[in-house]
Image (cartoon, helix red, strand yellow):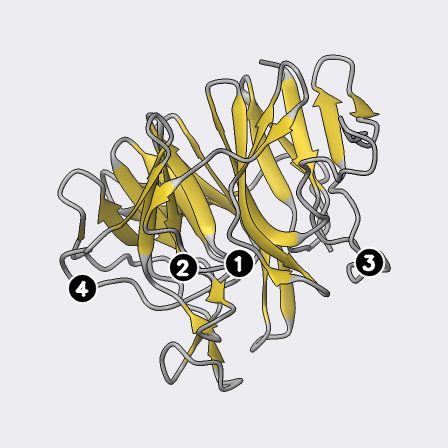
Amino acid sequence: GHRGYSLGGYCSGEDYETLRQIDVHIFNAVSLRWTKLPPVRPAIRGQAPVVPYMRYGHSTVLIDDMVFLWGGRNDTEGACNVLYAFDVNTHKWSTPRVSGTVPGARDGHSACVLGKTMYIFGGYEQLADCFSNDIHKLDTSTMTWTLICTKGNPARWRDFHSATMLGSHMYVFGGRADRFGPFHSNNEIYCNRIRVFDTRTEAWLDCPPTPVLPEGRRSHSAFGYNGELYIFGGYNARLNRHFHDLWKFNPVSFTWKKIEPKGKGPCPRRRQCCCIVGDKIVLFGGT
């Protein structure tokens, strides 16, 4: 429709140590107005309501009329692996009962959707204290988690990358990784190669080289439109540089093209979000 939802996220100067309810804002793309939902009151006096705590580094996806929120962290509780569901019609939160192999608590992962299935890739796992490159899927019709035993040469361990579903293929770009593997040694690398995961065969595909590439980056935005992948912004710590460039990737020709939009664009930033509303992109936030 014409509504966008903002749920939590990082805001410089905010308190992420005190446990408090996540905030929910609704953006009306027609009137260009924001509405903040009031805090959830407990149904039973003295009993805490079912609401996720304020966090950052989480993921949200929309399936039918439900927003599924998973992962993320705050500075007191750490990372979380509880699945929350937010009904966009009633504005009610719930915690669906899940079964199967639940992913370990993490932040900086990605989430994307094919049909009624959510795919989680990568992130920084709290218990293992390392970057991840595993893929879990959640079938929301049965609420069953599955750890996928992938075939092929897997994508590198990473966090704060993007994963975008085009058809039945998941396209992974960017993120922060470590030169020495899954463990964080402060030798960060920022890969700028596209990796492709085929959800039908559950295999990582061998990809041809691309002649022109965006700089590697983390915490950028990515979205699919008309069968192509777009990325905007992000940050590369090795270059100490924020970006405000817009790139388009064609999965058929396997080529990147830098887009030069008219008008005054957003300033360089990371941690923003981009949503498609009709044939427009709504960009919000960033640091």
Q: CA distance from mark 3 to mark 4?
A: 42 Å
Q: Nearer the viewer, residue 170 or 58?
A: 58
- Side of 173 where 76 appears, left or right: right
Q: Are marks 4 and 1 in contact (CB under 8 Å)?
A: no
Quick one: label 3 or label 4, which is nearer the N terminus? 3
Q: Are marks 2 and 4 in contact (CB under 8 Å)?
A: no
Instruction: Give the number of the mark in front: 3 or 2.
Output: 3
Residue 191 x, y percent position in the rendering: 40, 67
| Amino acid under disc 3 | Thr
| Amino acid under disc 2 | Gly
Report crowding for label 2: few under 14, some 14 to 19, many 20 or more residues within 10 A (C-alpha): many
Q: CA distance from mark 1 to mark 2?
A: 8 Å
Q: Which residue is mark 1?
A: 108
Which residue shows up at 27% across the image and 31% down it? Answer: 167
Quick one: label 1 or label 3, which is nearer the N terminus? 3
Quick one: label 4 or label 1, which is nearer the N terminus? 1
Residue 153 numbered tag: 4
Report crowding for label 1: few under 14, some 14 to 19, many 20 or more residues within 10 A (C-alpha): many
Q: CA distance from mark 3 to mark 2?
A: 27 Å
Which residue shows up at 74% across the image and 56% down it? Answer: 287
Residue 122 numbered tag: 2
Residue 133 x, y percent position in the rendering: 34, 63
Residue 18 numbered tag: 3
Q: Secondary structure at mark 1?
A: loop
Q: Are marks 1 and 2 in contact (CB under 8 Å)?
A: yes
Q: Quadrant of the N terminus?
A: top right
